[in-house]
Image (cartoon, helix red, strand yellow):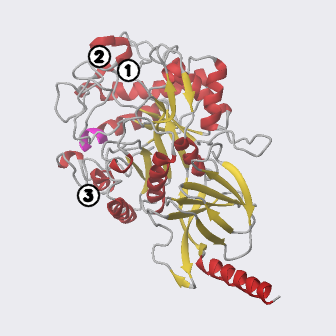
Amino acid sequence: MKYHRFLFSALLLMAAVSIRAQRIYRINADQPRQQILHFGASDAWSMKYVGLWPEQQQRQIADWLFSTDDDAQGQPRGIGLSLWRFNLGAGSEEQGDSSYIQQATRTECFLNADGSYDWSKQQGQRNFLKLAKERGVDHFLAFMNSMPVFFTQNGLATNTGRGGTINLKPDCYDRAARFIATSLKGLEAHDGIHFDYVSPVNEPDGHWNWLGPKQEGSPATNREVAKLVRAVSKALKKQKVNTQITINESSDLRCLLGTHETDWQRGFEISSFFNKDSVQTYLGNCPGVPHCILAHSYWTNTPVKYMRQVREQLRDTLARYDLHYWQSELCIMSNDEEIGGGGHFDFSMMTALYVARVIHHDLVYGDAESWSWWRALGGDYKDGLIRVLSNDGWKTGKAIDSKLMWTLGNYSRFIRPGARRYAMSVTDGGKLVADGETQPYGVMTSAYRNVDGSWVVVAINYGEGSAPIVLTLPESKHAWQLYRTSDVTGENLKPVEESNGNAVLEPRSVTTFVSER
């Protein structure tokens, strides 16, 4: 009898120690942060092929990317992307090998040399526009890597043989702008897709100057960007196209804040475009240009401390100009050495967790209102959410989902357009834990409230061991449904349990907590 009493007391003590060991994660409902507009990915360049595959294959891929439905067991069918980025082509496809661009990354152009438009072009991509809309995607963005080849200085959609200025003839700004407005208007008329946004330049500050033969692209100085944007604004107004013009799709956050491996003409982009003293480049009063700047999260994700530092610097600079920020493109590059760089597609949680950590930093420290991955589908390189296996240049093939795709879904599927991020605080034994919401090699948490009133918390466990947590709201108790993505087979946004806030984060996993409404 004494033995049983001792065992019972020991168990109680162990339970008490376990409870004390659990950190309490509190949503600070009185500390709202940025609004979350959407999560997205692009169709480049995959959908020109995949959009012509058999209908059943297309629908499976579209379900993975866009669906917000659950199956009979409550398992999400897809990751519910809410923004789809359409690559408006420049015409390298029609030039063939003379384009100086590799075949897989060439694009068609609606515009013909005689000035007429061919609305049968880019059919595979347009098929996926419609598949996205059918599955509830409300937001569409058209982006351009180059102006049409008929308007470029070298007659190509790549910058080969040129310097660091825009590959556009001086007398073709208005013609290029008319092409953009006409294309957007035509896509809406023929396919029923209204584009909320158009990005007329892509990574114009890239220090590589967009030399071929890899893909379409052009550098541009800030003055050239401003001139083009003003021309596009006039063309959209003239054709009564209600589309906002987003800038600047910067290649590096450092180009927003200063110069990076280029000169002043392609740097200091925040102040260049949104400081009234920058008379020649100021776009803050240009019709159709939102008070927002877009950039890509490449090259600034290592070292981990610097990843946070540069985003905090960005956030503080944005605040001075009352400016919003979208992270509009990311994939894995060679400097992402922690996960082996971009080579060889990874189906495990290694890449997925690394990207989740970047998403966390972009949202929590960069105050990003929108977050997009680069390619929806890719090959062996780590640039696709979905990998395609093909032996005939993508004319046919097999699409395979990945932990990376489902991990992005831990955010995109549950944090819906119009949600608001809220600050979080962490206590341990009643004491506040400094930066407790961000342990880059342990637990990272962020909280959101959807417009329907439901709360969402995304918890990343980067560590090799399990992590017990207690999740609380200040005003009331909530029941939480947990969805987990991990290396366990079948755990892809899997609804794993219901909880009152006490939970254990499994090793190397991402778990989304969704409250009752």
Could you give the CA–CA distance between mark 1 and mark 2, rounded to whole angstroms?
Answer: 8 Å
Task: Quadrant for the C terminus, please.
Answer: bottom right
Residue 249 placement (x, y as % from top left):
37, 43
Q: Earlier in the sequence, mark 3 or mark 1?
A: 1
Instruction: Please check the rendered image and state whether residue 10 is part of the magenta-colored stretch, yes or no.
Output: no
For badge 2, the amino acid type reads: Ser
Name the residue that disc number 3 marks. 277
Numbered-mark total: 3
Circle 3 crowding by C-alpha within 10 Å: few under 14, some 14–19, many from 20: few
Q: Nearer the viewer, residue 365 or 263?
A: 365
Q: Nearer the viewer, mark 3 or mark 1?
A: 1
Tag 3 secondary structure: loop
Which residues are the magenta region? 222-226
Q: Nearer the viewer, residue 405 or 116?
A: 405
Name the residue that disc number 2 marks. 99
Q: Earlier in the sequence, mark 3 or mark 2?
A: 2
Tag 2 secondary structure: helix
Is residue 150 in view? yes
Tell me if label 3 and label 1 are in contact, CB under 8 Å.
no
Name the residue that disc number 1 marks. 106
Residue 206 placement (x, y as % from top left):
26, 40
Instruction: Please check the rendered image and state whether residue 224 is part of the magenta-colored stretch, yes or no.
Output: yes
Tell me if label 1 and label 2 are in contact, CB under 8 Å.
yes
In the image, 93: left or right of 220? right
For badge 3, the amino acid type reads: Asp
- Residue at 62% across, 37% down: 66
Tag 1 secondary structure: loop
